[in-house]
Image: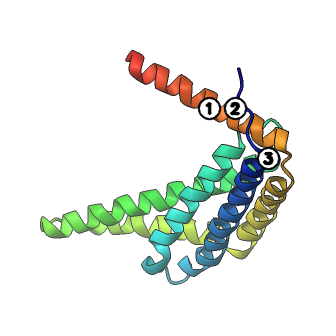
Amino acid sequence: MKQAIEPHRIAATRKFLSRYLKSQVTIVITLAPKLSDPFSEKYFHPLRVATRRTRAVVWILKHNPKKQGLRASNLYLKKLGNLLGKIRDLNFAIADAKNDCLDDGELKLQHMVLEKKIQKMTGLKPLNEFAKQIKIVQDFVGRMSSTSVMKTREELCGLMNKHMHRKFRGS
């Protein structure tokens, strides 16, 4: 038997998702341009975290039957997150190379190539396109009906149960 969720919990869930998404998107849109010319390590980590958190919300919404605008915004976040992750890995590799007195020239060259790719992705045109796409997602969250919130929740609960079943079964 399905348990009914009180309407105030559904409204609170929708409100939380909306606010959380807005706060993380604001961080991404604010910090992304600050990475470019010259590349600034200062904004690197907070942008990486906000990108990951925004993707998490988009992932949750992906399980909604009436999803809108998720593919394009998720693709941008995925590409940006992958580049930021590679830069992070290179930063550690460069630090390790210095500690071990190894030549880090090739690593620094790879770092510069990735910096250029990030600068291209965080330019005005791609960032404006992302802002348009994520606005569709934000509007969608604000308009989610109670039924839609419930279906998303049910889908996620089903995924969690399936995952837990696999984990404990050992496969």
Q: Quadrant of residue 54?
A: bottom right
* Residue 109 versus residue 31 in the image, above or below: above
Numbered disc in front, either 2 or 3:
3
Q: Quadrant of the N terminus?
A: top right
Which x, y percent locates residue 13? 70, 52
| Three-letter amino acid code of the residue under disc 1 | Cys
Mark seen at residue 157: 1
Which x, y percent locates residue 38? 50, 84
Mark 2 vs mark 3: which is more N-terminal?
3
Which x, y percent locates residue 26? 67, 72
Residue at mark 3: 7
In the image, 24 versus 160, the foreground residue is 160
Mark seen at residue 37: none
Are the residues at dot 2 and dot 1 in contact (C-beta closer than 8 Å)? yes
In the image, 72 versus 157, the foreground residue is 157
Q: Quadrant of residue 134?
A: bottom right
Q: Quadrant of the C terminus?
A: top left
